[in-house]
Image (spheres, coloured by chain):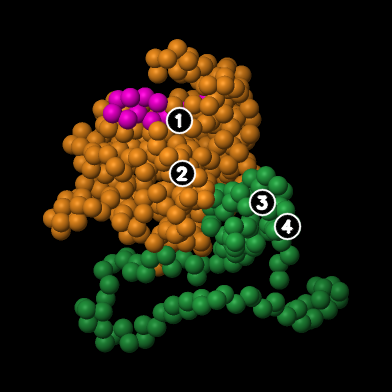
Chain colours: A orange, B green
Amino acid sequence: MTTRTTILSLPKEEYVHPGNRACTGCSLGIAYRIGLKALGPDTILIVPPSCLTVLQGLFPVASTKLPSLNVTFASTAAAATGVLEALKAQGREHTKVVAWAGDGGTADIGIQSLSGAAERGDDFLFMCYDNEGYMNTGVQRSGTTPQGAITANTPFKGKMQQRKDVAAIMTAHGIDYVATASASYPLDLYDKIKKAITLKGVKYIHIHTPCPPGWGFDTRYAVKVGELAVETGYLDLYEVEKGEFRLTGASAKTLEKGTRKPVREYLQTQSRFRIMSPEQAADAQARVDATWSTYSSGEG
Amino acid sequence: MTPDKKAAAQKPAPPRKPRAAKAAAPQKPTWDIGDIDTWGPDRHELGATIIEAGNSVFNETGGWRSDVPEIDSEKCDGCMLCYFYCPDASIVIEGGKAVGIDLEHCKGCGICAKECPTDAIVMKTDEKE
């Protein structure tokens, strides 16, 4: 068993400076801060348009201490491949290349270049932070917005379609490492990044980041809402290392103790689900139950 | 404008409280490009390149705040959860305990007060100068 990181053993060095332009209570700020501590200084970031670009600062201000390349939406993974080739030509193969995109840049617009890079087996880490919508342009729906959620372009009936499971799509590519994480459990995220950067090929980590203005809850509950998503089983923390599935952290504990809460508790914390029909809520619960029944039978 | 309001408007503003001086704080960069006409190609950066990484510390986001956290260091048991969960790295830690807030950058989200297990941090209404 590998040694667990604790809060006190985290590196003290900060790679994200305060004064960034993220919204008040943005949990991406937590995931980004702890994530960059795991990556360390020898890293080049590739960031498409997203909330993260706003967090990084508006010209001529930069909050990130690491070199960061801002590219177009569709080309994130392709640009990462290009940077890798440039580093190879310069003989700097020790430098890590990390693409960090939002859910729109991963699930909707950027998926073809990501899929292509995964198939080629280029050696970089792709992080997707999932705030379940296009938040910095004004809360539009994306491929990962859950059913029943109110967004700017589904204002009356909520989104009718189901959300896309990007981590499962990436697992189907047969890459070495796929994991899901949550901004409310940054140490779990830290350990997953530390493991991912030791492996070869494309690695994919999907981070759930609660968004106070987009989801409709008070800023101080940003961490609590993320914890509820995990405790209700709505989000399961797992990693698939070389085809081997394993629940991690809080999700493993929930399965072991059988203390999974009803999904309703998570849904009612956010005003975006306020017009959700009872059928949709029951459907959300049924989907979570179906997923978790495969875990308890040991097939997972 | 009513006479009352007029009198209030003429009253001089209360003096600003001096900000606590930071130890060895770097100077805010100034943009002096008065002689740009004489620049050659060697002095122009590539388009949209930011050479200085992490210069956002000069960006004061404290003005976004409506509530301000107050730390009672006596109650703090040094679990570091506030430092860990702060999205803006604005908790000042000294000797393993939370002792203060970086008020120039704290956006007042209240996550630290919510996560503190010993209630050493409470949110108070921010009195603007």
| Dot 1 or dot 2, earlier in sequence | 2
Q: Which residue is mark 3?
A: B77
x then y, percent, for residue B90: 57, 60
Determine the secondary structure under disc 1: loop
x then y, percent, for residue A229: 55, 31
Image-quadrant location for residue B103: bottom right
Within-10-Å neighbours for mark 2: few <14, some 14–19, many 20+? few
In the image, residue A2 above or below residue B97: above
- Distance, label 2 to label 4, CA atoms, is 27 Å
Within-10-Å neighbours for mark 1: few <14, some 14–19, many 20+? some
**Quadrant where the C terminus of chain A lies?**
top left
Q: Which residue is mark 4?
A: B74
Tell whether B41 sits left or right of B17. left
Are callouts 2 and 4 both on one chain?
no
x then y, percent, for residue B19: 64, 75
Q: Which residues are magenta?
A: A233-246
Q: Amino acid at mark 4?
A: Glu
Comparing A145 with A296, the one in front is A296
Are callouts 2 and 3 both on one chain?
no
**CB contact under 8 Å: marks 1 and 4:** no
Q: Which residue is mark 2?
A: A5
**CB contact under 8 Å: marks 2 and 3:** no
Image-quadrant location for residue B5: bottom right
Chain of the residue on which disc 4 is drawn: B
**CB contact under 8 Å: marks 1 and 2:** no
- Distance, label 1 to label 4, CA atoms, is 36 Å
Image-quadrant location for residue A172: top left
In the image, residue B124 above or below residue A2: below
Given this view, does label 1 or label 2 mark the residue nearer the observer?
2
Q: Amino acid at mark 3?
A: Asp
- Whether residue A99 is visible to the viewer of this picture, yes or no, is yes
